[in-house]
Amino acid sequence: MLNLMYHYIFPKSFEKSINGIKFTSQEKLRKQIIKLKKKYTFINPEELNDIDARSINKNLCSVTFDDGTKDQFKYAIPVLDEFNIKAFFFIIGSVFDKKIPNSHLLHFLLNYKSDKYILNKINKIFFKNKLDYNEVYKISEVYNYEKNKTRRILKFVLNFKLANNYYQINQFLINELGKCYNVKDLIDIWFGNKDDIKQAIKNGHYIGNHTYTHNYYGSIKNIDVIKNDINQNHELIKKKFNFETRSYCHPQGGDNGIINKEVSKYLKSIGYKSCFKAVNSGKIDRMNLPRIDNIYLN
Ligand SMILES: [Zn+2]
């Protein structure tokens, strides 16, 4: 089974005006679907959640979008509609309480400040200028798709090296962004709103749980904190969208190890039917569904 992972989708013509992110163009999304349709049968989220284990290895393909950003509702759904494909959209609850995850703050800030400026500032504030960029580069293979060396280092420092300083980083990014942008506007511009999500549900798409905070497991460790993060988002989705989700996606890929397993076990115990992770590895079962990032498709 092939599970596709998508993040940002914009028209190709936006390439020159967006600096902080790597996005898949609508045109590319359409091409990928046409090609994959020759080999795979696209499966609806509801069908996947009901499928029995023996059928799971067939030539099935599911489509997932992470983080619930605005572009997915505006630019990806119209392309999916052309093929009548229904997808999973994994949303982050804290956004609806006007809190922006660090990764998204960074994506947006990079439209205004260079990678080098941000990295040097972080080095100064959090490492007293002692961070060895070459050393960080060596251990940052998780971002090997990132061709810009400084950006790769920056992302690794923020998401992994400083995982325990999540709230200080959040404040730092908000301060920096506040110098060039009205941060309050970012929620509406960057994330799908209540109407976007309600409309997606109405059209047969599926809203999944991506935790309330989107925090990396490595910075939490305590499984009870992660369970709360899951429950909080589950309740938010239920209350705000009248949708009882049964699907989950680990934030930032999870840990691909022991915490992922614990989380899957917990999800199963509260009635979840599917759980996705970021990498394409391991034994496939509905509570451990590997995905391939579309950027690796031809
Ligand atoms: Zn995510």
Image (cartoon, grey):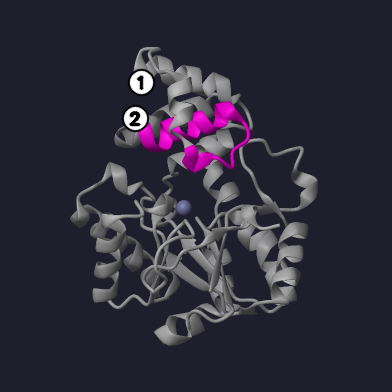
Name which residue lies at 35% across and 62% down.
Answer: 233
Characterize the local packing of mark 2: few (<14), some (14-19) or many (20 or more) Cα atoms within 10 angstroms: few
Give above or below for 92 relative to 165.
Answer: below
User: What separation in Å lies between label 2 and label 1 (alpha carbons)?
Assistant: 9 Å
Label 2: state its secondary structure: helix
Report the residue that reaches farthest toward the right.
13
Give above or below for 168 relative to 9.
Answer: above
- The disc, 2 or 1, on the residue closer to the chain's N-terminal end is 1
**Contact between labelled residues 1 and 2, with CB atoms less than 8 Å apart:** yes
- Which x, y percent locates residue 133? 47, 21
Name which residue lies at 72% across and 67% down.
Answer: 79
Characterize the local packing of mark 1: few (<14), some (14-19) or many (20 or more) Cα atoms within 10 angstroms: some
Q: Nearer the viewer, residue 139 or 247?
A: 139
Name which residue lies at 51% across and 58% down.
Answer: 66
Find disc 1 in the rendering and name its residue.
Answer: 126
- Which x, y percent locates residue 166? 34, 36
Q: Is residue 21 magenta?
A: no
For residue 168, which numbered disc appears in the image? Answer: 2
| Number of marks present in the image shown | 2
Task: Kindly tell me whether residue 51 is visible in this rendering.
Answer: no
Provide the residue span drawn in magenta.
Answer: 141-161
Amino acid carrying mark 1 in the image: Phe
